[in-house]
Image (cartoon, rainbow, N blue to C red):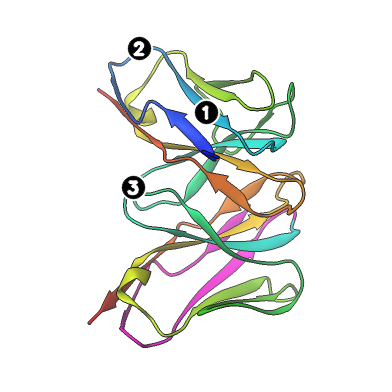
Amino acid sequence: GQSLEQPSEVTAVEGAIVQINCTYQTSGFYGLSWYQQHDGGAPTFLSYNALDGLEETGRFSSFLSRSDSYGYLLLQELQMKDSASYFCAVGGTDSWGKFQFGAGTQVVVTP
Amino acid sequence: NAGVTQTPKFQVLKTGQSMTLQCAQDMNHNSMYWYRQDPGMGLRLIYYSASEGTTDKGEVPNGYNVSRLNKREFSLRLESAAPSQTSVYFCASRTDRTAYEQYFGPGTRLTVT
């Protein structure tokens, strides 16, 4: 079957670094995306990896290892506004345009 | 440029009633999506449309129908609502230029009693 696994919750203090892991098992794959969702809001795109390695976008970085079917999102210099749910998503499942999302990781940032 | 818009924002239905959720995008995107999100869960794909006139089932299509009216609009219809369809429904669109980034609407919060 197809699955994406990520931790359900992570808690950290302001200024800390948090890593959210995502392992996937899907029938197709052309990339791993990350989305942020604040309570009651729409998901917004953060980052994408099609090839192995690290992609950096400001305080957020994302990593992919295709051979390990594994990726992670790194949140640095945590701020209170980073408290949200973070979802990994695999593109290309079943057919090229389709995506499958993980269940999400709730990040709680404390003062 | 409004992005992706959805109507209504909230809806309460009784079991067996029907309704259509509307979605429109003004970004000239070819691909559009309907997802549902249940508490504590990720987004599950209901239907996908790669272009005007084409639709494809996702993970959870049962109980739903879709219509890609034109390039801008993609509607989701519940013919006979059931309590199991209580959820938040998100519409999204995706540019072909960057194959991975989806833009989401604000969502429709549907309760079926």
Mark 2 lies on residue? B16
Q: Earlier in the sequence, mark 3 or mark 1?
A: 1
Residue at position x 32%, y 48% from top? A40
Residue A99 percent across, percent down from the top left: 64, 49
Looking at the picture, which amino acid does disc 3 mark? Pro
Circle 1 crowding by C-alpha within 10 Å: few under 14, some 14–19, many from 20: many
Measured along the vertical axis of the image, is residue B19 above or below residue B8?
A: above
Residue A76 relative to residue B14: left or right: right
Element at badge 1? strand
Question: Gap in Å between the C-alphas at discs 3 and 1?
Answer: 22 Å
Residue B44 percent across, percent down from the top left: 52, 43
Looking at the picture, which amino acid does disc 2 mark? Gly
Q: Earlier in the sequence, mark 3 or mark 2?
A: 2
Measured along the vertical axis of the image, is residue A37 above or below residue A18?
A: above
Please report, as a chain letter, where disc 3 is located.
B
Do the CB atoms of the residues marked 3 and 1 lie less than 8 Å apart?
no
Residue at position x 30%, y 74% from top? A80
Q: Residue furthest left?
A: A111
Res. B23 mark: 1
Residue at position x 54%, y 40% from top? B3
Please report, as a chain letter, where disc 1 is located.
B
Mark 3 lies on residue? B39
Question: Gap in Å between the C-alphas at discs 3 and 2?
Answer: 23 Å
Residue at position x 77%, y 72% from top? A51
Residue B34 relative to residue A15: left or right: right
Q: Which residues are magenta?
A: A1-28
Looking at the picture, which amino acid does disc 1 mark? Cys
